[in-house]
Image (spheres, rainbow, N blue to C red):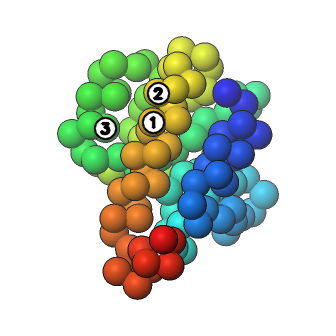
Amino acid sequence: MKRAELAAFCKGLNGAMEDYPFGPDPLVMKVGGKMFALIGTNGSVDNISLKCEPHMAELLRMEHEAVKPGYHLNKKHWNTVTIDGSVPDNDIREMIRHSYELVVKGLTKAQRAELG
């Protein structure tokens, strides 16, 4: 997956919005005003930071060398995935969905109702 594909997949999730609160990079994807993905580039390599349940975050780090503790984020709850082809695209999509669902779960009942 490339940066544009990551962004398109994230934008396809219900209620997802893009934002640039830190300048032109990274692209921040939000739902209900809360971040669920940060898509950036380190040199010429794309990466995506995603929220993750702590136990699952540790397992993903052990399973994939390209999955590291969140860069400039809470390392217990966030992973940064280097998009180098070593993590299958379907796994990345599942990580994105998991992050999105964790954030939606933390929204107020009214915010969740707005999402449908």
The answer to whether residue 41 is seen in the rendering is: no
What residue would you read off at disc 2? 91
What residue type is disc 2 on? Asp
What residue type is disc 3 on? Ala
Residue 57, compared with residue 50, is above or below; it is: above
Q: Which residue is at the far top?
A: 86
Q: For the residue labelled by badge 1, is the local secondary structure a helix, a strand or a loop?
A: helix
Q: Quadrant of residue 20?
A: bottom right
The answer to whether residue 15 is seen in the rendering is: yes
Q: Which quadrant is the N terminus positioned in?
A: top right
**Residue 47 location (% of width, % of height):** 61, 36
What residue would you read off at disc 1? 94
Mark 2 → mark 1, Cα distance in angstroms:
5 Å
Q: Earlier in the sequence, mark 1 or mark 3?
A: 3
What residue would you read off at disc 3? 57
Q: Earlier in the sequence, mark 2 or mark 3?
A: 3
Say whether residue 50 is left or right of residue 24: left
Q: Residues within 10 Å of mark 2 (few under 14, many from 20)?
A: few
Q: Which residue is at the far left?
A: 55
Q: Quadrant of residue 42?
A: top right
- Could you tell me if the residues under marks 2 and 1 are in contact, i.e. CB atoms within 8 Å? yes
